[in-house]
Image (tube, rainbow, N blue to C red):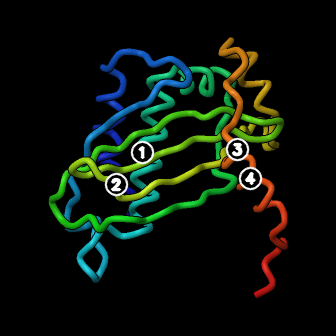
Amino acid sequence: MYPLRRFTCELLRARRQPRLGPYDTHVCHLRLMPWDMDPWRELNNGRTLTLYDIGRISLAQRTGMLDVLRRNRWGITVAGSTTRYRRRVTVFQKVEMRSRFLGWDERFFYIEQSMWREGECTSGVLIRGALLGAGKLLPPASFIAATGWGAPPPLPDWVLAWGKADATRPWPPQS
């Protein structure tokens, strides 16, 4: 089940925090609860992605992105992701989540997120998001024009390489 209470608390907290610039990092802190764990008593990989979802929405709140999306009746959907898991996180441990926009290309937004515990990165995710309006994909330029954010920094080489590699995967999957 989606953690609606945690989502609501984090969104309300983000509303009370100062605005961020479009490429600033949003930081939030979470304590992992028993319902976040898998049978091996560590943070469930599916819940990890759900927690990152909450971090992205909080980032969107603090950068003013949510206001623009609501005003234009737009949405954003995840169009791709890659996750690395490096350190185990167990029940009641506290993690720091960091979320930031990296930029966009002609089709997608790119967001990088990570979780940290005691100075070590436990996991990281690269998200490719698509802008939706009137039931179709819109170019990120539509959003940028509405926000006035201006040109982003160039996307890092590793993001570009990921996009190229992902484009070579067959679709639909063969199995």
Residue named by callout 1: 54
- Residue located 62% across and 27% down the image: 69
**Which residue is label 3 attached to?**
157
Could you tell me how far apart the alpha carbons at marks 3 and 1 are, in whole angstroms? 27 Å
Spatial distance from mark 3 to mark 4, Cα to Cα? 6 Å
Task: Give the mark nearer the N terminus: 1 vs 2.
Answer: 2
How far is the residue under mark 4 from the one under mark 2? 34 Å
Of pointers 4 and 2, the one earlier in the residue sequence = 2
Q: Amino acid at mark 3?
A: Asp
Disc 4 secondary structure class: helix
Residue at screen point 32% across, 29% down: 12
The residue singled out by tag 4 in the image is 161
Q: Residue 3 has which mark? A: 2
Secondary structure under tag 2 reads loop
Ranked by sequence position, the earlier of labels 1 and 4 is 1
**Of tags 2 and 3, which is closer to the observer?**
3
